Image (cartoon, rainbow, N blue to C red):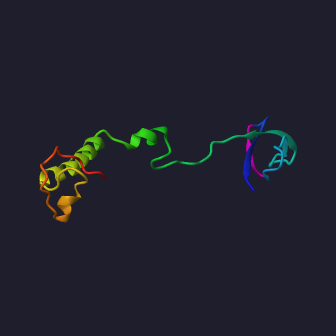
Amino acid sequence: MPTYVYRFIDSGETIEVRQAFEDDALTEAPHPSDGVLRPVKKVFTPVGVTFKGSGFYKTDSGGAKKSPAASPTTTSADSGAAAAPKTDGGGTGGSGTTAASGGTSTAAPSAPSTPST
């Protein structure tokens, strides 16, 4: 059962009362010093939760994961992979698998093509 805080309206003193979720909020409670019923008001206190780490704030999600420095690195890696078959000297057009299998072609060289992935 949760514990709720109530404040006596006349004196400003507070008490803690254990109540079920289904119970209505108290309007009167016995004062601890004399046991007389006095009017009370429920006090709402902030929850003691601390969020640590990443992923809890608006700036931690979405486009924040991509950095401008990552794009050139990815582009240069992609262009390096595409440039490797061109400088290999094998194969003439088509899929580019002829050079990898060791076969040669007697056809006239054509414009270099990028291998399909």
Q: Which quadrant is the N terminus positioned in?
A: bottom right
Q: Name the residue nearer the viewer: 49 or 87.
A: 87
Q: Residue at x 45, y 42 (%)?
A: 60
Q: Residue 79 appears at what percent x and percent y?
A: 22, 46
Q: Residue furthest right?
A: 36
Q: Name the residue nearer the viewer: 106 or 27.
A: 106
Q: Residue 63 appears at what percent x and percent y?
A: 41, 39
Q: Residue 67 appears at what percent x and percent y?
A: 33, 41
Q: Residue 47 appears at what percent x and percent y?
A: 62, 46
Magenta includes 16? yes
Q: Residue at x 16, y 63 (%)?
A: 103
Q: Is residue 10 above or below residue 76?
A: above
Magenta span: 12-18
Magenta region, main secondary structure: strand
Q: Is residue 48 above or below residue 58?
A: below
Magenta includes 41? no
Q: Residue at x 36, y 42 (%)?
A: 66
Q: Name the residue nearer the viewer: 77 or 81.
A: 81
